[in-house]
Amino acid sequence: MTVRQDQLKNGFRIVSEHMPGLQSAAIGIWVTAGARNERIEQNGIAHFLEHMAFKGTKRRSALQIAEAIEDVGGYINAYTSREVTAYYARVLKDDVALAMDVIGDIVLNPIFDPREIEVERGVILQEIGQAYDTPDDVIFDWLQEQSYHDQPLGRTILGPSERVSAFSKEDLSGFVAEHYGPEQMILSAAGAVDHDALMKAAEEMFGHLQPRKGLIAEAARFTGGEARQDKELEQAHFALALESPGYRDDAIYTAQIYSTALGGGMSSRLFQEVRETRGLCYTIFAQTGAYADTGTTTIYAGTSADQVSELANITIDEMKRAAEDMTEEEVARARAQMKAGMLMGLESPSNRAERLARLVQIWGQVPSLEDTVSKINAVCTEDVRAFAENMAVQAPAALALYGPVSGAPTLAELQERRAA
């Protein structure tokens, strides 16, 4: 398997990886503009724009977009994150050119029909309402807001209902004009693909675009803070976030190994102590996520009202204990889980195309798998213990609680326990 990367004169980037033996391919365009690129009055517009891409172009109706891909047995979709918006498809190898034509069409030629805007506005408002009815969606939005208070990175991807209710065709077109330049786009493909054919198609489709300087996202500041709402639910939802490295910092590998050992699987410390030994919850996990200039290690659990205080305190205790006695066996297991998860995921052309786009976004190039694996292997037990100590005692923290949480400790009380 060979990764190839090119760039058009206007800055549009193309990256692909041919995977021998596959009869299908994944192809998409990743735009380096997500929720954190929005001004406050635009909050939610990147996600709205993603929806509208499928609602008609100058060449195809909404139905024709869907039929073009589904007639050949493929699928097409999109997503918005805080740093990218992606439009992608999975098709058989003979239909790669068709998929690229459809994706290019929806990115370059959306018509933003006012009638379709109103229809999709209703769909998104329903999506927002559904999220509010889902406690583990609500709590992570609150946690993000407390982690990066009063910043684009702390705002929800869906946006507030009042803003979504007011977006116009001009608002959507304005966001495209600001952020959908050729230098902000990455065409990524993996599987049964021909890089030279992709290059030719990209030149024909995107080569005419004029370069434009993208707006730089506001630098992130992990502020920390607490959000809680006492509500009559079956479970008390607990989420704790701690400032961690961004994805351009090699310490991200240590952070990910730490969170895996702490709460990444059935053998992890939190799962064993909180669920298996004490029976305090059904779900508990820890994970590390990263952005360009910051990251968070997050711990989440759902439990009963009378046990949320015990669960929160044990979580802090386990974090402190990890700094003292994290074993080489635990670190080795976490390293193995991390490598296996990455390598197994890369057996899918969709995952591989997404990885290629993400790496080009981060580094401007695709580091080899061997380089990534070597960085994972280089993390030793002493590194993880040192990182664990920082997480347990010093790292800025944010807390979100939702449900019957009147008996849960405050962030200040958890901070005292960390310092004790």
Image: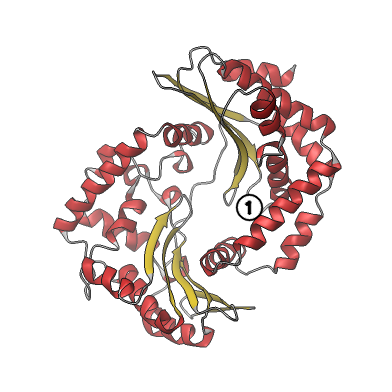
- Classify residue 255 by image quadrant: top right
Q: Residue at x 75, y 51 (%)?
A: 335
Q: Is residue 382 above or below residue 283?
A: below
Quarter the N terminus occupies: bottom right
Dot 1 amino acid type: Tyr
Q: Judge left or right: residue 91 versus residue 285.
A: left
Residue 3 in the image, given as x and y percentages of width and height? 62, 77
Q: Which residue is mark 1?
A: 247
Residue 107 x/y as whole percent = 34, 68
Residue 14 spot, x, y in % from top left:
51, 76
Which quadrant of the view contains residue 362?
bottom right
Q: Is residue 420 above or below residue 61?
A: above
Is residue 209 visible in the rendered image? The answer is no
Query: Would residue 6 be found to the left or right of residue 373 on screen?
Result: left
Q: Is residue 223 above or below residue 249?
A: above
Residue 32 x %, y %: 47, 60
Name the one closer to the observer, 22 or 45.
22
Residue 351 visible in the displayed image = yes
Q: Secondary structure at mark 1?
A: loop
- Image quarter hosting the C terminus: top right
Q: Residue furthest left?
A: 115
**Residue 252 versus residue 330: which sits nearer the camera?**
330
- Density class for disc 1 (Cα within 10 Å; few <14, some 14-19, many ≥20) is some
Give the image's coloring scheme: secondary structure
Front residue of 381/4: it is: 381
